[in-house]
Image (tube, rainbow, N blue to C red):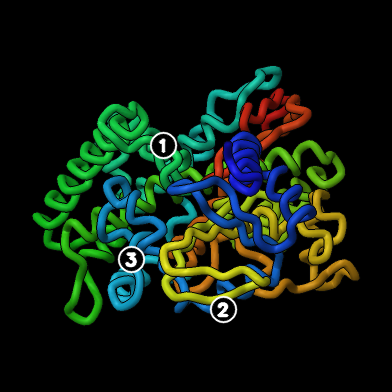
Amino acid sequence: MNAPGVSRGLADLHAFSADPYATMSRLYREHGAITELGAGPMRFRLALGTDATAFILGHSELFSWEAAFTALAPLTGRSALLVNDGDRHRHLRRLVTPAFTTRRVAAHRDTVTRHVEQAMDGWVPGEVVDLYPPLRRAVRRATLASLFGAAAVERADGLDEWLHDIHQAIDTDVVGGSIDRGSGSPVWRRALLARSAVHRWVIAEIERRTRLDEPGADVLGVLLRGVDGARLTDDEITDQLVSLLEAGAETTAAQLAWMVYRTMRDRPLWASVTAALAGHPSDAPEPPRLARLVSETMRLYPATAIISRTVAAEFTFAGTRFVPGDLLIFSPFHTHRLDAVWPDPERFDPGRWDPGSPRYRRPAPHEFLPFGGGPHRCIGARFATMAITAAFAALARRIDGEVLTTDARPAGLIGMRPRAGITVRITARR
């Protein structure tokens, strides 16, 4: 017979697997900052609440990303920022960062706009559309063009399916060990085959580019050019680009779909946003109210619902002792919905981000984590924010619609996509 603690841990793990969002809220109410789930090799601890998040982000020396995510390295690549720590991580990040400066990211804005407009070309008034699939394709194609150049999009047959297979395995396995990684696992097997196919495709693009006199101004060109005479190897470049394509496009598309859903179904809010865009030049930076919409969307639907860390040095927090090898998980999703930090947290309220509003309160770094935090904060955060903003503006300028989905719920822990899509009846084109 299992001990009561083991039985409870397994029951809580089952509940977490079935509905992680509601389960985290329940466990925080019942147990406070630390809850142990699972048993044996599937044991981990949830660290919830702002004190726990602040502790984790403020003591990065106690934790390892590499150990937490190394099992995913066959999919992410051994050089991906996600699976590296310390000097190796700092070296890789220094060579990737120049591709994502404010100026370089802004140069890709028109690419995003063009691909979203193309996705809407066939939509006519009266048509019923699930927005998520076409927006996901548009964002992925725009990301592909920004990374590899416009011509690469036409050479990308099969890439969408391969990236989907990789993402499905990573999202399923984000806690670590939650799927069988053996050769008999169809999810893992498909993902490994897909990763090999994507790797070959990226290497071919690198070889094509290196035959040219000028590397180009896209992300691949910047990475090939290097920094101060140093550059990533071809395999290192491949790992960074695959990560950006897989995780970046998926999470950006999901957040874009949620932003449209939350805004379009609030008719006064939608009317005010479209009016502001109508009076704003399309080639100028989007008005500040769009930045507030983006922030509120990212609060409710962060790029990743949970983040894993493996303990690297012994410590005690909230009366619980942690030893090296322990798996710890904290949650931007849960933190972003704490009523102690965010009044009326379930309400979509862009006004809470307006510095001129009495509802405004600037969150501390550990209270707002749309792209994680600390030294491993998502390197593509600036690009993702630009893409969501530009894509939403392109859609809102072009169409109006009636949201038919009445109770959209998230699915997945990385890229919290709408479980059943976002169904809209197109009512007008502009």
Q: What residue would you read off at disc 1?
A: 179
Q: Write the residue at 33% across / 29% down.
A: 185
| Badge 2 amino acid | Gly
Whole-percent x, y for residue 267 in the image: 84, 39
Q: Earlier in the sequence, mark 3 or mark 1?
A: 3
Q: Quadrant of the N terminus?
A: top right
Q: Position of residue 250 (x, y in %)?
A: 48, 43
Circle 2 residue: 58
Residue at 22% across, 60% down? 236
**Which x, y percent locates residue 309?**
48, 62
Mark 1 and mark 3 in contact (Cβ < 8 Å)? Answer: no
For the residues labelled 3 and 2, the Cα–Cα distance comes to 19 Å
- Frontmost of labels 2 and 1 is 1
User: Which residue corresponds to mark 3?
Assistant: 84
Closer to viewer: mark 3 or mark 1? 1
Image-based side of 44 in relation to 104, left or right: right
Which amino acid, mark 1?
A: Ile
Q: Within 10 Å of the Cα at label 3, are there few (<14), some (14-19), or many (20+) other Cα atoms?
A: many
Instruction: Tell me if residue 293 can be seen.
Output: no
Is tag 2's residue or tag 1's residue first in the polypeptide sequence?
2
Badge 3 amino acid = Asn
Q: Secondary structure at mark 2?
A: helix
Q: Secondary structure at mark 1?
A: loop
Q: Earlier in the sequence, mark 3 or mark 2?
A: 2
> Farthest residue toward the left?
211
Tell which of 184 and 335 is nearer to you.
Answer: 184
Which quadrant holds the C terminus?
top right
